[in-house]
Image: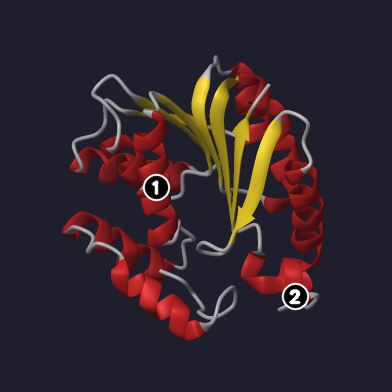
Amino acid sequence: MKAEVGLIIHQEQEAYLEGLLPKRDLLLQEMEHFADEHGIPIADPEVATFLEITVRAIRAERVLEVGTAIGYADIFMARAMSPGGMVVTIDISDEMIGKAKAYVKCAGLQDRVEFHKGPALAVIPTLDGPFDLVYLDAVKEEYRDYLDLALPLTRTGGVIVCDNVLWRGQVAGGRLLGEQYRSSTKALQAFNEHLTHHPQLVAQILAVGDGLAYGVKVK
């Protein structure tokens, strides 16, 4: 769940939209509680639901995720796939991958999620495409590099989704919540400009969750 509310849209609107979300099952609720209790950033439920909708809409069979955390978004996406589908996910933390594997196994989806451990910038070049969907949710300063590496592996008509691109309102608001956010905020501002004007993409920034970039590869 969100650490803070009302930073992207008005608080009453956010509460209303959150109230419309389908209730998550017990496993997902447990994951949300665990993430909240241990300060682990996972996708907001509306973002995870948006990913599920996208997987279903484009009938994605192969998904690349950068930033596994505890596997919350993986379960939404893997559940939306046919039995032959695969989420290929990357994380640098043994602890997070171990926890994610346990949750994915509890969901009965271990045959639809493939885990890779290491820095994403080193792992992505070792992967084979094509991917139908790429989901970025890791180091904000590296988003442009992730995109540059992943886009050649994405099929024409494939979708790019990037989380936290409004970064608690800092990217558009001209204010910082702390000096520790300066580098990531500047990087996201540059990334959003790069993404929305990329010659191979039609892309837009959506006020979903903490800001969601959505693009379709057109050439």
Cα separation between marks 2 and 1: 27 Å
Residue 36 in the image, given as x and y percentages of width and height: 39, 70
What is the quadrant of residue 194 in the picture?
Answer: top right
Judge from the rendering whether residue 22 lies leftward or rightward of residue 172; answer left or right. left
Q: Quadrant of the N terminus?
A: bottom left
Give neighbour class at mark 2: few <14, some 14-19, many 20+ (Cα, 10 Å).
Answer: few
Name the residue carrying label 1.
73
Tell me the colour scheme of the image: secondary structure
| Residue 114 visible at all | no
Q: Amino acid at mark 1?
A: Ala
Q: Amino acid at mark 2?
A: Gly
Name the residue carrying label 2.
173
Q: Quadrant of the C terminus?
A: top right
Identify which residue is drawn at 25% across, 62% down: 22
Residue 26 in the image, given as x and y percentages of width and height: 17, 59
**What secondary structure is found at the residue carrying circle 1?**
helix
Judge from the rendering whether residue 1 lies leftward or rightward of residue 192; answer left or right. left
